[in-house]
Amino acid sequence: MKWKLRKCPVDEIYTMKEICPKCGGSTFVPHPPRFSPVDKYVKYRLESKLGRKLDC
């Protein structure tokens, strides 16, 4: 599924375009990634978030 809603990080406005109509900057998809129980990168995301190395 492709998300249609996008957000400008500078102006904090929502749009459906890849380029912000107000400032002309690029927009991003504000939705979080889908959860998967078979995620092989969860360890690296948690290490990045916590700021320390996990022992697994």
Image (cartoon, rainbow, N blue to C red):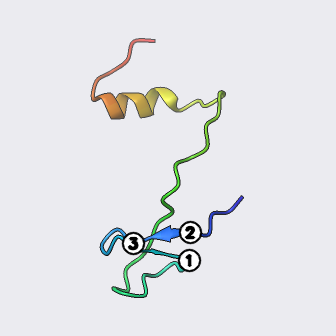
Work out whether 38 lies above or below 7.
Answer: above
- Is the C-beta separation of discs 3 and 1 under 8 Å? no
Name the element at disc 3.
Answer: loop
The residue wearing badge 3 is 8
Q: Are marks 2 and 1 in contact (CB under 8 Å)?
A: yes
Mark 3: few/some/many CA within 10 Å (<14, 14-19, 20+): many
Q: What is the quadrant of the N terminus in the image? A: bottom right
Q: CA distance from mark 3 to mark 1?
A: 10 Å
Residue type at mark 1 is Met
In the image, what residue type sits under mark 3? Cys
Dot 1 crowding, Cα within 10 Å, few <14, some 14–19, many 20+ = some
Residue at the far top in the pictured view: 56
Q: Measuring 39% from the left and 12% from the top, which residue is drawn there? A: 55
SS at circle 2 = loop
Pointer 2: what residue? 5
Where disc 1 sits, the SS reads loop
Q: Say which of 39 and 3 sits in front.
A: 3
**Above or below — where is 10 with respect to 31?**
below
Question: Where's residue 45, x and y in %?
Answer: 43, 34
Quadrant hosting residue 40: top right
Displayed quadrant of residue 35? top right
Residue type, mark 2 in image: Leu
Quickly name the residue at label 1: 16
